[in-house]
Image (spheres, rainbow, N blue to C red):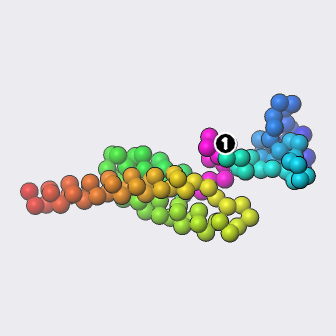
């Protein structure tokens, strides 16, 4: 049982609580570690990541279809602002690479969309 924060039941082989993310044994300083504090876990799971950054990453992928590219651009800018604002808080948000990916993909395919639209107007 976690007991420290949420009281969830923990199986014997788990190192962290599935409910609150607290480390079962705690860390060396006596404080319980959060699941999002581990960089390896953050690469695999969207723990501690800005929801805007997650949306920006997926919109960046879908911007290859060209139509959602401007939306990817806007959401990426919002995500980057959200991440930088959270840097001063006790639990900063992560996902800057995902947000920048959405920004780059949104920019590239928004330019492609603009070129196609202009060429259709003057054709």
Residue drawn at 52 percent across, 53 percent down: 97
Q: Which residue is mark 1?
A: 40
**Vertical comparison of 54 with 86: above or below:** above
At 71% from the left edge and 49% from the top edge, which residue is drawn?
36
Q: Left or right of 20: which side holds 48?
A: left
Q: Quadrant for residue 121, please give it.
A: bottom left
Q: Quadrant of the N terminus?
A: top right
Magenta highlight on residue 44: yes
Mark 1 secondary-structure assignment: helix
Viewer-side residue, 50 vs 100: 100
Which residues lie in the magenta part?
A: 40-50
Q: Is residue 24 left or right of residue 36?
A: right
Residue 115, position in %: x, y? 21, 57
Q: Residues within 10 Å of mark 1 (few under 14, many from 20)?
A: few
The answer to whether residue 55 is left or right of residue 29 is left
Kindly tell me whether residue 6 is visible in this rendering.
Answer: no
Residue located at (39% from left, 52% from top): 105
For this orientation, the residue located farthest to the left is: 123
Count of number-bearing discs: 1
- For the C terminus, the quadrant is bottom left
Instruction: Where is residue 24? Give x, y as percent.
Output: 86, 42
Indicate yes or no whether the magenta region holds residue 18.
no
Which residue is drawn at the image coordinates 36% and 58% (left, top)?
107
Residue 83, located in which quarter of the rendered image? bottom right
Q: Is residue 118 visible?
A: yes
Q: From the viewer's side, name the closer residue of 103 and 20.
A: 103
Residue at the far front: name it.
28
Q: Position of residue 68 (x, y in %)?
A: 37, 53
């Amino acid at each position: 049982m976690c007991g420290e924060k949420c009281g969830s039941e923990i199986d014997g082989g788990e190192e962290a609580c599935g409910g609150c993310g607290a480390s079962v044994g705690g860390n060396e300083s006596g404080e319980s570690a959060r699941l999002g504090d581990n960089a390896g876990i953050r690469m695999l799971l969207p723990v501690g990541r800005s929801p805007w950054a997650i949306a920006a990453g997926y919109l960046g992928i879908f911007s290859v279809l060209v139509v959602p590219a401007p939306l990817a651009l806007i959401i990426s800018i919002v995500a980057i602002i959200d991440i930088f604002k959270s840097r001063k808080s006790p639990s900063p948000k992560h996902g800057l690479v995902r947000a920048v990916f959405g920004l780059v993909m949104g920019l590239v395919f928004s330019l492609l969309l603009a070129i196609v639209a202009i060429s259709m107007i003057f054709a």
